[in-house]
Image (cartoon, rainbow, N blue to C red):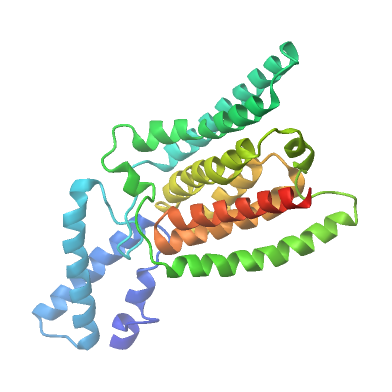
Amino acid sequence: MSGELWGRRGSIVYGAGIARSAEAQRECENAFGALGEWQVAQEYVNPDVTYWVLFFRERRGRLQQLVGNHAVRADGLGRVSVPWSVREVWLGVLAAAVLTGVAWLIVYLVTVSLPRIDLDIWVALIPILLELLLLVPVWWYAVRKRDNPSKALGFVGFRPLILAIGVGLLFGYSLFGGLYGRLLDLFGLEVQTDLTPLAQQLSTPWPLIITIVLVAPFVEEVFFRGFVFAGLRARCDWRWAAAISAALFAAAHLQLTFFIPAFVLGCVFAYLYQRSDSVWPGMIMHAAMNALAVAVMYVQF
């Protein structure tokens, strides 16, 4: 019976450590920690009980050091939670949608009233400004009046192994994308809008390169992974948080045929964040994919 309760894997204590919410994990940890301390005091101990008691003591020590910086445990594994709530996540998503909608309306009105606009300037400014609008709710809910917001958003170091995992996952995604593209070809559809005609009209490729390779990966990973995914993950199972953030990421591209591939990509980037607690791996992989797409586009013409 002791092994079923206190075993290191497959036991009741181990299972409680992967509870779905941070609150449930903390409650389970407090309960089992108190029970373990009582058994130690009564000398009803074995190696497994000793292991868990020491584990809980070490965790409490780390927590006490982190609380001063708003670093509250989120999943029982030393992970730092975020200071913004799920409600603030959804308010941020709504604010981003409203800001983007208003911006598109302004762009439309300007286009109608000023038909002769330099294309290089247009491509350089409008997409970048639309992307940067996503950072407004991030600043309002995650950065403003927060202690150490960069860490909470995932601007921390990571193991190089995560990039290797990312490369493997994106290779699998490329195979999926190829099959998906062939399927759409049967119906005369494209996965994404072809930007080649636009690129051919530009006097320089730099507006597209800066927007697609630099600005978009940075902004989108900060918003969808650092803000949305991290905020949801702290209060629910990370898989649900990944699915929700990936769906929002896919919907933000405003292309129905690209929704499924974008959703898969969003899940990949969320998984990299989950493994590393860092926004950098997803950002690097995102930028690399976009850079490859731009390179292929320019090589073709």
Judge by depth and name the residue closer to the eye, 41 or 99.
Answer: 99
Q: Residue at x 35, y 59 (%)?
A: 24
- Camera sees residue 172: yes
x, y (%) of residue 186?
Answer: 90, 57
Left of 100 or right of it: where is 293? right
Q: Residue at x 32, y 64 (%)?
A: 76
Q: Residue at x 38, y 51 (%)?
A: 154
Judge by depth and name the residue closer to the eye, 121 or 157.
Answer: 121
x, y (%) of residue 67?
Answer: 20, 50
x, y (%) of residue 258?
Answer: 72, 49
- Camera sees residue 236: no
Residue closest to the far top: 113
Q: Residue at x 14, y 75 (%)?
A: 38
From this view, report whether residue 263 is shown above or below residue 128: below
Left of 98 or right of it: where is 45? left
Task: Give the mark count.
Answer: 0
Q: Quadrant of residue 33?
A: bottom left
Quadrant in the picture for the N terminus = bottom left
Judge by depth and name the residue closer to the eye, 252 or 237.
Answer: 252
From this view, report whether residue 115 is shown above or below residue 28: above
Left of 264 or right of it: where is 146? left
From this view, report whether residue 91 is shown above or below residue 240: above
x, y (%) of residue 290?
Answer: 62, 50
